[in-house]
Amino acid sequence: MIPRAFAYERPGSVADAAGLLRRHGEGARILAGGHSLLPMMKLRLAAPETLIDIGGISSLRGVTDAGSHLVIGALTAHAELAASELVRSACPILARAAASVGDMQVRNRGTIGGSLAQADPHGDLPTVLLALDGEVSAEGPDGMRTIAASDHTKATTTCGVRNPGTSEPRASAICDFACRRKRLMVRQAHHERVRAHRAPVPLQSDG
């Protein structure tokens, strides 16, 4: 099917995107990789009046080592996470989860921010966020807000990030993912245990 007509905006910064969300209100949706939103639009299960394409905001891409944690931009693709030596050494469970998402096309276009904001119960990354006691940072006209993993996913396809000017949680979001370096134990589907502990050197998997 063909989506309904919509307006298209392509902001150059997070501040511009937040301003557009405030201006267009409930009729606006964020477009990142598009693997969740575009199929819904084609089926007319979603019919936004305005698409705000954040793909050109370079500050939302990449992985950085912040010392006590990793900061991952919302537009970082799954394939980038899976291939990142920094992620694979400091947070191997996240790299493995990203490598298992969908197929190659999805991993190359889909983003971690989109996956977390969509809050799909079939998604791997929201579960990893919770297991690692991660945090999501959301930026809007009123500044930056940090959301704990336990408060992030509210319901199916609904997360704890609000569009500017509204009080309701929405699936559209601009966020960073912080993978905390702390002592934890994660049991994967095949019952392999991966240990991550606080240390001044990159973390290693014990297999």
Image (spheres, rainbow, N blue to C red):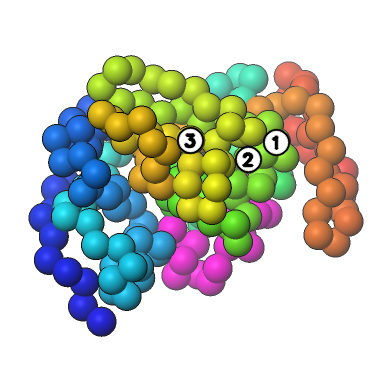
Q: Is residue 115 above or below residue 176?
A: below
Mark 2 lies on a secondary structure that is: helix
Q: Main secondary structure of the magenta part?
A: helix
The image position of residue 189, as x and y in percent, is 81, 59
Mark 1 lies on a secondary structure that is: loop
Q: Quadrant of residue 144?
A: top left
Between discs 1 and 3, the one toward the N terminus: 1
CA separation in Å, label 3 and label 2: 14 Å
Left or right, 109 with reference to 98: left
Q: Which residue is depicted at the point 29% across and 18% down?
A: 142
Q: Answer whether residue 61 is visible to the viewer in this image.
A: no
Residue 108 sits inside the magenta stretch: yes
Q: Which residue is depicted at the point 33% across and 68% down?
A: 45
Discs 1, 2 touching: Cβ within 8 Å: yes
CA separation in Å, label 1 and label 2: 5 Å
Q: Which residue, given by chain and number where applicable, does mark 1 sit on?
A: 132
Between 171 and 67, the residue placed more toward the observer is: 171
Label 3 is placed on what type of residue?
A: Gly
Q: Which residue, given by chain and number where applicable, does mark 3 sit on?
A: 160
Q: Which residue is depicted at the point 30% across and 32% down?
A: 166
Q: How many neighbours does mark 3 have within 10 angstroms: few (below 14), some (14-19), or many (20 or more)?
A: many
Residue 198 sits inside the magenta stretch: no
The image position of residue 50, as x and y in percent, is 17, 52
Q: Quadrant of residue 183?
A: top right
Q: Which residues are magenta?
A: 94-110
Q: Residue furthest bottom?
A: 1
Q: Which residue is depicted at the point 35% across and 26% down?
A: 139
CA separation in Å, label 1 and label 3: 18 Å
Mark 3 lies on a secondary structure that is: loop
Mark 3 vs mark 2, foreground winner is 3
Q: Which residue, given by chain and number where applicable, does mark 2 sit on?
A: 129
The image position of residue 91, as x and y in percent, is 68, 39
